[in-house]
Each structure stands twice: as C-alpha cells, then as structure tokens.
Amino acid sequence: MVESLLIETRNLTKSYGPHVALDDLNLNIPHGATGLLGPNGAGKSTFLKTMLGLIQVTSGEGSILGYDIRTEGEEIRSKIGYMPEYDALNPKMDAIYQVQYSGELLGMNPNIALSRAHQALEYVGLGEQRYRTVETFSTGMKQATKLACALVHDPELIIADEPSNGLDAKAREFMLQTLENTVRQGQKSVLMASHLMEDVERVCENIVLLHKGKLAAQGKIEDLKAIDKEVEIHVWGHATKMEEGLLDKGMKVRREGRVMRVRYQDDSTYHTILSTAAKCETQIRKMHDHEASLEDLFLVIMERLGYDVKGSEALLGDLS
C-alpha cells in the first residue's frame, strides 16, 4: 500500500452469500475531493462501510490514510468525519449538544468537544441556532448539523453521503460552498457520494464510478471528459446534406436542427468539417469545442465502454 494515497485497495471483494457487493476492486484515490458515483445497487454504501471499518471484507486488502481497513478500523474512524445520508440526529437534543456528543463518541474530552461544537456549528452557518432542538430545524439545517458532527474532531477526511439531498437551492448552494471551502481552504479530503452529477463536478476533481460492484472508471474528471470530446457547429442551409456528408466520411454526428456535434477524432476533424461544408454549400456560423458534462461522461462510460476496470489512460486508449 502507498501511504501517499488517500485510499488504496487491491482485489477488494465483499460477498453476502452468493451476492457479490464489491467485486475485485483496485482503487487508487488521491488526496483532495473525489466523487463516488454509480446507480442504485452499484456498491457505494458497501464500499463506504468497508472504508470505515464497519464491515469486514471477504477478500483483498485496502488502506485509508495509511491505515489497514482490516485491522485498524478504530484508528481510521478517528481520522474520518462521516456525514451519512440517513437521519442520524436526536430530534430532542439541542444542536450544540448533538455535535458535542458526536465528539465525545470519538473520545474527545467533553469540554474540548463543546468548544469544537461551537466552532463547527459556526462554520456550517448555524452559530445563531445552536441552542435550538434538532426537531425544529429545516432539512437544510439538519444536513448542516450532520456536517458539523462530521467536522467536530477536525478529521483528515470527510465522507459525505448525498450531502445536498432534499435541500432547496439556497441551502444546497451553501452546503456545496462549505464542502468546497473544506477542501480548498481547510486542506481536507472529501469523498462525496451523490446522484447529482452537477454537485460532484462542482466540488470534486476526481471520480470513482461503480457498477454492480465493479469499477467502471476512475481518474480526474477533466481527463475522463476527453473520451467524449465533440466539435459543435451551427449551420445554415443544406444541413441534412452536410450531416450525410460527414457520416459518409466516417464521422459520428449528433444533430438537433441546425446544431450538430461531431465526435472529435484528431486535429483533422476541423478540416473535415470545413471541407464538407464547402462541398455541400453549407454556411458554418459558429464552431467550437463542446465540453461534455459529467452526466454525459457517466452515460458514455455506462453505455459504450462496458464495466471493465478502466482509468483515464485506458479509457482514452479505447477510443484511439
């Protein structure tokens, strides 16, 4: 295991009888912010629980922050702040005492935990509401309280499971900004599981994509996006003829009216587009590179590249 990595696994497998929840995972997750993606049943929750040392793996090995997930679960949990998706708060407790209690569960001195609880609640925007009971909080305030509970012991890694789930636009923006600040200003690492691609792209630099317990892709978002690079053109006149001309030359084209997106192959793609337009007497009124969204990337990997283990280099190589 390489200690400079945030998380590393080798042939990590978790089975529940005949059901394989994690299937031979080999991960190399760097420090920083990483999005954990995958459809329902992909194995995300099982993976998080194995990283926290809450369940034992069937075979393989893994380390997180340099600690062995098989034998050093207590040390791991002392270094991690976990913000679960489910409701984990006591509705009858004041927020300040809820966060203090979370610190005490991790072995903090009660006075230190209380002091840290004040700081954590201020950080997540609940400083003025800290003496209110949790049951009086909105969904956004409850999510912020869970984040404060995760931050109270100043962890090296925050695991945030669906952190913006159920939030309105304002609360969601504040949550994402807080997570961004935690990574960029607080110099902490974040592992963020979310079904909202826009949120992951906002906070994270890297992604891990799971499907049916297997690793579908891992790497930097900007590198992985290159697998679906397209050139977008806005045309006028003979659009159908031009589309047919591009298809005849082996180009892959997506068209909506006068807007076409042509799959980028290499630098000759631009020449092919221009020469085809000239031959078809079609005007190109705008041409620029189209940057795929993370959602586009997700669909491309799931639909075209299958579910074999792939990093950014392998994915790019598949299209060369």
Image: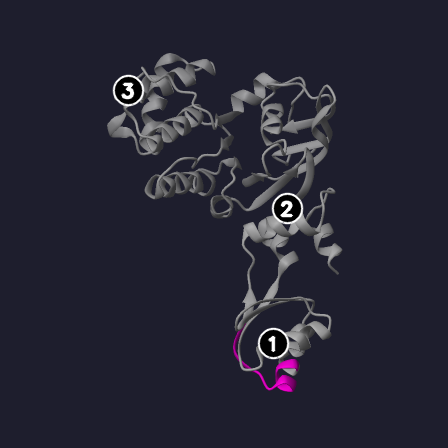
Q: Name the residue carrying label 2.
A: 219
Residue 314 position (above or below residue 164)? below
CA distance separating discs 2 and 1: 38 Å
At a point 63% along the width and 19% down the height, the residue shown is: 55
The amino acid beneath tag 1 is Thr
Helix, strand or loop for disc 2: strand
Helix, strand or loop for disc 3: loop
At a point 63% along the width and 34% down the height, the residue shown is: 42
Task: Give x and y (percent) for residue 239.
Answer: 58, 77
Task: Identify the mark nearer the N-term, 3 or 2.
Answer: 3
The amino acid beneath tag 2 is Gly
Q: Quadrant of residue 50?
A: top right
Task: Identify the mark nearer the N-term, 3 or 1.
Answer: 3
Q: Is residue 281 magenta?
A: yes
Q: Name the residue carrying label 1.
A: 240
Please tell me which residue lies in front, 29 or 287: 287
User: Magenta segment range?
Assistant: 276-287
Q: Name the residue carrying label 3.
A: 133
The mark lying in front, picked from 3 and 2, is: 3
Residue 115 position (above or below residue 143)? above
Residue 52 position (above or below residue 38)? above
Residue 111 position (above or below residue 246)? above
Task: Give x and y (percent) for residue 134.
Answer: 32, 21
Q: Is residue 230 magenta?
A: no
